[in-house]
Amino acid sequence: MRAAYIERFGPPEGIVVGGLPAPRPGPTDVLVAVAATTVNPVDTLIRSGSYRTPLSFPFVIGRDMVGTVAEAGPGAPGFAPGDPVWCNSLGHGGRQGPAAERAVVPADRLYPLPAGVRAEDAVAVAHPAATAYLALFTHGRLRPGETVLVAGAAGNVGSALVTLAVWAGARVVATAAAHDADYVRSLGAAEVLDYAAPGLAGQLADAAPRGVDVHVATHGRHDLEVAVPLLARRGRIVVFAGTTARPVLPVGQLYQKDGALVGFVISRATVAELAQAADAVGQLLTAGRLRPRAVEEMPLADAAEAHRRMERGELRGRRVVLRV
């Protein structure tokens, strides 16, 4: 089969697009004919060796995919040849990635693709939307009527955070570049503030007079000296970006508010947590409420170029879909 793979850790130039033996599913696996995959920042970290996870070479790159069932193992009930499906947790933890004509997926990590949803749209939103779900609900414990602050709301994960929070009945205060304000408002945000404006902390306090119940930031800088004072009683700050960030934490203010600071990595999410996120993603895809802002399609042969562009920071707010 044709695949995009690496034989050792290194730069994008090490990605080979060529033939590999087709994988075979185990008893509880499903063999999927892959239609499309995409490129996430974490994919570049795994390829380079910066994010260590069990894998074997040659290693097929990628994480997310949409395709159709080719064959289901006897211990994979509920899947039949021809079923449209998707997955967003391949390519780590000993699993090969999906940037290939065929991919083996454990049945408990595979989800039905709602009828009428384009493969390109689904694969583009799968990872950002699942990340947003875990941030808001699994770790942020968001409840209807609460106030959510989304810092960096115009990007892939940011827009999913706004969409999911509004869907759950929360009030969203967001920050974004001035030229992205109308887009973020179109997702349902009640207030959109320019993150570069002077006096932003005061504007945020005015926009959330009862305090922020869940604070999420996609940019990874995490100005906790601003975030903690904004919290409502028992407010939660959820972090999932910024591997090198070393912010100052106002500990006294945090504990006097009964506040919490929690971090997570989607690669460590349990199968059950991923399934809960997938259910929500499926509902929003079906309703047409979850859509990528901008998608660029490239052939699988251009996988190395897609990784180069991701590392150069050229894909912010855009999703590259690799057609298999």
Image (cartoon, rainbow, N blue to C red):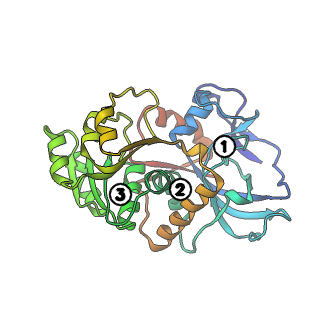
Q: Secondary structure at mark 1?
A: loop
Tell me the number on the disc at residue 126: 2
> Which residue in the protein does label 3 denote?
162
* Mark 3 surroundings: few (<14), some (14-19) or many (≥20) residues within 10 A: many
* Mark 2 surroundings: few (<14), some (14-19) or many (≥20) residues within 10 A: many
Tell me the number on the disc at residue 170: none
Looking at the image, which residue is at 62% across and 54% down? 65
Q: Position of residue 53 (x, y in %)?
A: 66, 34
Q: What number of labels is visible?
A: 3
| Residue type, mark 2 in image | Ala
> Which residue in the protein does label 1 denote?
91
Q: Secondary structure at mark 2?
A: helix
Q: Position of residue 298 (x, y in %)?
A: 54, 48
Between 193 and 67, the one lying in front of the other is: 193
Name the residue furthest front.
256
Between 265 and 15, the one lying in front of the other is: 265
Report if residue 228 is visible in the image.
yes
| Residue type, mark 3 in image | Val
Q: Tell me which corner region of the image, top left, top right, bottom left or bottom right, holds residue 105.
A: bottom right
Looking at the image, which residue is at 84% across and 52% down? 24
Report if residue 293 is visible in the image.
no
